[in-house]
Image (tube, rainbow, N blue to C red):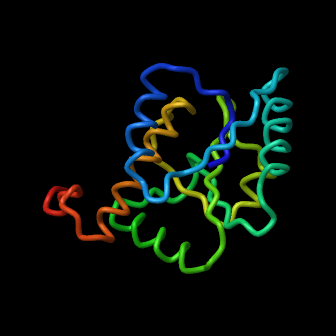
């Protein structure tokens, strides 16, 4: 994960840590400092920093409100397909102002955690939970209750 902002101790960090500890292998997070200025300037600066930190061979997946909103089963299938590409996966999480268009243009996929807007620190925990859920689905582990809508 490449994520804008430095996570401090608190409930968001605890949520992320809870699910990240369950993942094999555990995800790596590279934090990008939050920028200052007008909203467009913040997005531009943070976007440039995200792109600079993104490995050249990475399969980039932007967490973006305008992206596809797959359900958990579809996300598990997408994750499997992305992993089969043999490239490192990199989820891009913007800051409070969102992602710069240059970042979404570089991303090969854009996914959304739903139509609601989520705080960027909470998104890390939510993504970690969905990654864990996807692992469980693919391993036929009972964590995901497939019978539930």
How many badges with numbers are in the image? 0
Q: Residue at x 62, y 44 (%)?
A: 29
**Residue 128 horizontal/vertical position (percent):** 45, 47
Residue 84 falls left or right of residue 142:
right
Is 29 placed above or below 13 here?
below
Is 96 placed above or below 46 here?
above
Q: Is residue 114 visible?
A: no
Q: Residue at x 41, y 72 (%)?
A: 77
Residue 91 falls left or right of residue 14:
right
Is 56 placed above or below 45 here?
below
Is 118 placed above or below 63 here?
above
Q: Looking at the picture, tell me which residue is in the foreground, 10 or 145.
A: 10
**Residue 91 horizontal/vertical position (percent):** 61, 53
Q: Residue at x 50, y 34 (%)?
A: 117
The quadrant in which the C terminus is found is bottom left
**Residue 94 horizontal/vertical position (percent):** 67, 39
Q: Looking at the picture, tell me which residue is in the foreground, 82 or 43.
A: 82
Residue at the left extreme of this rendering = 147
Q: Is residue 22 visible?
A: yes
Q: Residue at x 46, y 27 (%)?
A: 12
Q: Quadrant of residue 88?
A: bottom right
Q: Looking at the picture, tell me which residue is in the foreground, 18 or 131.
A: 18
Q: Quadrant of residue 133?
A: bottom left
């Amino acid at each position: 994960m490449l994520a804008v902002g430095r996570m401090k101790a608190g409930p968001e960090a605890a949520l992320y840590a809870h699910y990240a500890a369950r993942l094999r292998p555990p995800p790596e997070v590279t934090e990008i400092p939050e920028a200052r200025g007008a909203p467009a300037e913040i997005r531009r600066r943070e976007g440039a920093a995200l792109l600079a930190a993104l490995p050249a061979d990475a399969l980039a997946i932007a967490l973006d409100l305008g992206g596809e909103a797959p359900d958990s089963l579809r996300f598990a299938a997408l994750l499997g397909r992305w992993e089969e590409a043999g490239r490192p996966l990199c989820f891009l999480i913007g800051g409070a102002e969102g992602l710069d268009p240059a970042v979404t243009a570089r991303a090969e996929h854009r996914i959304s955690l739903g139509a609601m807007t989520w705080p960027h620190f909470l998104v890390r925990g939510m993504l970690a939970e969905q990654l864990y859920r996807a692992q469980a689905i693919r391993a036929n582990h009972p964590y995901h209750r497939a019978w539930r809508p």
